[in-house]
Amino acid sequence: MPTLPAGPPVISASRLSKHYGDFKAVDGISFDVPAGESFGLLGPNGAGKSTTMRMIGGVSQRTSGQLTIMGLDPEEHGPEVRAHLGVVPQQDNLDEELKVRDNLIVYGRYFGLPMSYLKAKADELLEFAQLTDKASARVDALSGGMKRRLTIARSLINEPRILLLDEPTTGLDPQARHILWDRLFRLKESGVTLILTTHYMDEAEQLCDRLVVVDKGRIMAEGSPAQLIREHSTREVLELRFGSERNTTVAGDLQGIGDRLEPLPDRVLIYAHDGEATLEQVTSRGLRPITSLVRRSSLEDVFLRLTGRSLVD
Amino acid sequence: MSAQLTAEDYALKGSKRPLAALYSRNARAVIARGLLATRSSNWLVMVSGFFEPVLYLVSMGVGLGALVGSVDGPDGQPISYAAYIAPALLAVSAMNGAVYDSTWNVFFKMNFAKLYQGMLYTSLGPLDVAIGEIFLALLRGALYATGFTAVMAVMGLITTPLALLMVPASVLIAFGFASFGMGITSFMKTFQQMEWVNFVMLPMFLFSATFYPLSVYPQGVQWFIQALPLWHGVELLRQISVASFSPATIVHLGYFVVMIAVGMLLTTSRLRTLFLS
């Protein structure tokens, strides 16, 4: 993977806060993102991820703290910073009054880009989004997945140096997600810095070099996906189902097995280095789960450990 | 997709230009978008806006005018009732169009179509959006005023070529209302609050000496009406329609110049509240 010469961070946030009245949407978060990194904000809905993204784009004003993007304060230099930003908001905000291709061209003109460039670029991006045959369709005639792809294509019209993706693959089918991940990976290879929020573990694990786990406006942990799993979870997880009545009552009988026990309403999780060996310990105590599953730890487990809650409620 | 980026690409030099945080000198992109959207989807709404004052002119001017007969014009000469109310209706239409575009239209695009959210994630600043939207409102106002003046000519209500000055004067009136309207919209959070705009506009339309002279009111009410912008618009266009100018013409013009200046100051100072959160 190509690495850029180490320079100052392209995004630097220091004790960044955003309050709405008494509600602290973002509560003093600090992080640095070096050029070319793929950086993730992971957390449940309402954790403050989107608000952070909006502050990076300079469209939401911070309550306190410092923030610089490529060396500039986005509140003081919003238009200049955003000239090099691509943004995929959580909810598609395509221009419903314009046709598909015009959406790309008009958006490019907001950046002050010349028509000669935009015409060719729009066609290239329609190809990228597999929407070439929909070029002159109305936006409201597109399916949800097509709209999402068009929004993503639109964010690339200015060949951004930093791409902000707020829940980019929500609403996409699995095949479309993998295509998008592939495209994002290629952008990253060309040196584009990716900032993405997600509540999908697999997405974070696939795309992020490094991520912060965010909950209630605060950073709970920071590191690469592998690092976070190593620090906050075990190598493997044994998932046992004893039937909804018994999951919590059986927990007492499982004490002492594995590193840690997590009884949930629908299953019991046992964290251990070796899942198969742990399962043998369970059965040797005469316990007979209805189903059992050994899997690798994921960021979901990290989140559960850090917050005591699941990511997707 | 793009060439390999280097560390230099990530070091921006900030501009020292005033208003750099709010303005990127690209309002024309907002204007181009508005024209394209009008061409492809909402031209029918525009046509209907042209007919409203024409319908008033026909029903009140011709219909009611048959009962009223002739009245005293701005210069004391008798003119037909239709010729008396036509410039007033033009002023009202300039006001309505500008207020609609700068309040309801902005409110809707902001909170429901999410159009501005998209725009503001680009190089555009809030001032580009505000200037572009106000320009579009004025362009539309100029088209309506031209059409209405043509209707007046066809109906034989125009007696002097100077009456053509009603078109730029209408744009001036529209500018006053539009610059103020956008600033006021920044204080609005709900549809219920937006209804207050209509609550102010309707009585202003009915009572600003639109259909009868100011002299019917007692002195105190006269002063109140004379403080309102629409009355100045009505009087200005009425004077232009018969080319009867007086020192009061300067006052009417000056009223709108000040209104535009104050309105633009208000709107600019409220841009962050209006467009950024």
Image: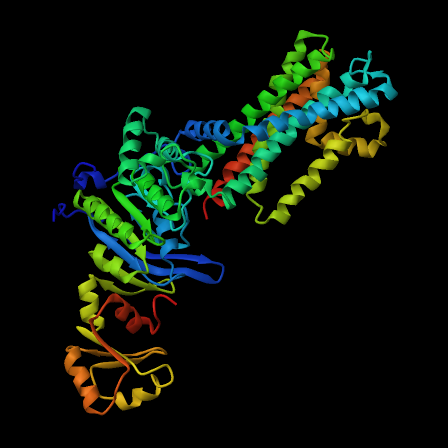
Q: Position of residue B254 (x, y in %)?
A: 64, 23
At 38% from the left and 44% from the top, the residue drawn is: A147
Instruction: Give residue A102's quadrant in the image.
Output: top left
Specify whether B209 is left or right of A249.
right
Q: Does residue A286 sit above or below B223 in this rendering?
A: below
Q: Does residue A176 sit above or below B213 in this rendering?
A: below
Q: Does residue A203 sit above or below B158 in this rendering?
A: below
Q: Quadrant location of the N terminus of chain B?
A: top left
Q: Position of residue B44 (x, y in %)?
A: 57, 29
Instruction: Give residue B154's quadrant in the image.
Output: top right
Specify whether B119 is left or right of A113.
right
Specify whether B217 is left or right of B18.
right
At 36% from the left and 38% from the top, the residue drawn is: B122
Q: Position of residue A215 (x, y in %)?
A: 35, 65
Report the front residue among A168 and A197: A168
Is residue A44 in view from this perspective?
Answer: yes
Q: Position of residue B53 (x, y in %)?
A: 69, 25
